[in-house]
Structures are given as structure tokens and as C-alpha cells.
Image: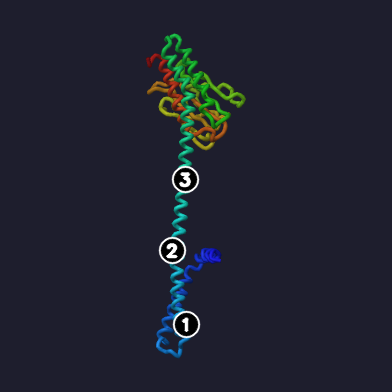
Amino acid sequence: MRDRVKRWVDAWFPRIWWLPDVVASVLGIVSTLLLTLFGADTTNMLLLVFGVVCAVVGLVVKILQMGNYRQAEITAKEKADQELSNAIKAKDAEIEKATQEAVSLQAALKAAFLPVVHDLRYLAACKSNKREAKLVQLVGTALGMAPMLITSAEKYRMVVYRRESGSGLKTKLVVMNYFAPPGNGRDEEPRPFISGDGGRGDKVLAWLAKAHKPKFIGNVADETDPDWQGSGNGYATYISAPLKHEDRVYGMLTVDSAEPGDLDPTDERVMRLLAGLITVGFQIRNGTEK
């Protein structure tokens, strides 16, 4: 019975919060009036008793109202504490998840980059007439690590372009090597970029001349890239990283994928690291780093 009454009060009190004040005030006025008019008249004992009862009932209503206010404050505080506790738990879970993902990414990067670092050591140790072959091997090793580095996409292709001087004054970015997962439909060899074509070649080579960090386009349909004039055939998102030391351009590392959202900013950071290792390989190959 007590619980039923409590549930009824909890349910209805917010709707009639004004009623206890009104009742207490009316009863107080009635009791004061009756006691003033008939307090000294013993012949009106019934009215006197009624006045006392009104005063007592008004006091009880006021006390109950104060108690309900207090209970409401306690309930509100408990609810706020619970919401705060839930928010803290959710944030802790989010931090824990991010930490686990970071640890997993670090382990994956270490496993993927270690073979490339080993190839760099062999490249630096070998004779100059054998460095070209070791550089080609290093690039192949780097591209072979793509499945460990690009984990959120299936229809992707990673390419290493090498800068070469062509006939006349033309400069080219030729395909040194590329990788696409078997069966994903992206195994056709990419086209080179050639200066003086008035389009994609001029755009890319001009960007490389001034770029010092990767370019990430999440969706070619939504994002305008003034430094790019690619065909867009087979890909909807891409990351391009310059292979460059100071102002010397060695080439470009790219990865593109068929669906928007396949690549993300984490992939951009990975490409920056991989491009850095490949760039060191070019520096060793050209004798700029002993």
C-alpha cells in the first residue's frame, strides 16, 4: 500500500506541484479565521475543533510537500550522478578501444615496415653498381606490405612512380612497380604521367614540385582537387605521397580504392611513413646518403 501511494505521488506530483501550496494556504486561512472568531466562544466548540484540525492538516500538507521536494532533489541528484557515471564509463570504454586500436596499429606498422628497413640496410651496405637492383627489391617489398597496411579496403591499388627525364625537356613519372590484391579487378598497369600533356601529367608534376606532405581525397565526386586531373577510372578515393627530399623529387607513392570511405586519415599517415622509407632508398641509390 505504501509503495502504491508513493508511486501515485511520484506520478502525479509533477503535474499538481501547485496544489499542496494552495491547500496549505487555504487551510491556514480557514483555521486562523475560525480560531480568531470563535476561539473564545466555548459554545462553538465544533467550529473551534474544525479550525484546529484545519491548522494541523495544513501543517501536515506543508510537511509532506517539503518531504516530497526533498525526495525529488535526492532523486534528481541520484539520476545526475548515474548519468555522469554512465558518461564516464562510456568515455573510458572509448579510450580503451582507441588504445587497443593504436596498439594494434603500432604492431601492424612494425611488422610491415621491418622488412623495408632491412632492405634499406642491405641497400646501404651493397656496392654502388648493385644499388639499383636493391632499390627495385626494396620497392617491391614495400608494396608487398600493402595488405598489412591497407586493411579497410578491398579494391585498392598501390603504385610507386619514379621520376625520369624523357626526350627533350619532358619529365615523366613512370611506373616502377605496383600492387593490387589478386582478383580485385585492379591489376591493370597504371599509365605514366608525362609533362607537356596539358592535363594530368602537368598537374601532378606541378604538385610534386611544391608538395611536402601527402594529399588525401576521400571522395573524388565531392572534393575538388585543383592539382589533379586524373581519369577517375576504377577509383573513388586516393592518397598521393611525394617521394621527395627537400626540393629533389624522386617520384610518387599512391594508393587508390574503388569506394568512397575505403581510405581514411590513418591510411594517410601510413602512406607518409612508407613514402619516407622509400625516399631514403632513393637517396641511398643516388649516393646522397652514405
Q: Viewer-nearest of labels 3 and 1? A: 1
Residue 171 shows in the view = no
Q: CA distance from mark 3 to mark 2?
A: 28 Å
Q: Is residue 63 above or below residue 88?
A: below
Q: Residue at x 48, y 24 (%)?
A: 111
Q: Residue at x 44, y 61 (%)?
A: 73
In terms of sequence position, does the residue under pointer 2 or pointer 1 come before the other? 1
- Given the image, on which type of amino acid does mark 2 rest? Arg
Task: Give the percent coordinates (x, y) of residue 283.
Answer: 41, 17
Which residue is denoted by mark 1 in the rendering? 50
Secondary structure found at label 3: helix
Residue nearest the viewer, comparing 165 with 92: 92
Task: Give the percent coordinates (x, y) of residue 236.
Answer: 55, 32
Which residue is denoted by mark 2 in the rendering? 70
Secondary structure found at label 1: helix
Quick one: quadrant of the N terminus?
A: bottom right
Which residue is denoted by mark 3 in the rendering? 89
Label 3–label 1 contact, CB within 8 A: no
